[in-house]
Amino acid sequence: MTSDQPFTAPDGSTVRELVQVRDGAKNQSLAEATVPPGGGTIRHLHRQSEEIYFFMSGSGRMTLGNEEREVRAGEAVLIAPGTPHKLTNPGSEPLVLLCCCAPPYTDADTELLE
């Protein structure tokens, strides 16, 4: 069940939850996140959740641990639990991605590093 109410996540991205525990998910969650042009997320990690980011539109820079690389629509990134990560969008269009978390995302599992 899609939530119609986007909100700002602790990392600074705008998130729209698509499937979460309240919808009956037990082992994963799915959300759409948007990083606006010129914006970025706060460097953070998730202690328990493994994440997969699938980029749907736009392009940006992904910092994963000590590595940084460009990301764009059609690409996916796997983020292991405990790995610091950050997204920046130096482009002129929104960077939109799907975020799948297993176990399901919770704010309590998020540690901000900046």
Image (cartoon, rainbow, N blue to C red):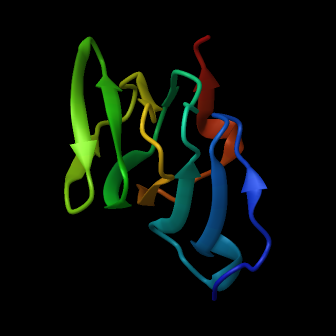
81 displayed left or right of 69: right
* Residue found 36% across the figure and 46% down from its top: 50
Give how far across and how far down residue 18 sits, in percent. Answer: 58, 76
Q: Quadrant of residue 2?
A: bottom right
Can residue 62 be seen here? The reply is yes
Looking at the picture, does residue 32 appear above or below residue 114? Answer: below
Give how far across and how far down residue 104 sits, in percent. Answer: 53, 59
Q: Residue furthest front?
A: 92
The one of 97 and 22 positioned closer to us in this rendering = 97
* Residue found 63% across the figure and 34% down from its top: 11
Q: Quadrant of residue 91?
A: top left
Looking at the picture, does residue 49 appear above or below residue 64? Answer: below
* Residue found 56% across the figure and 53% down from its top: 34
The one of 76 and 1 positioned closer to us in this rendering = 76
Q: Residue furthest bottom?
A: 1
Give how far across and how far down residue 5 sits, in percent. Answer: 80, 71
Looking at the picture, does residue 60 appear above or below residue 66? Answer: below
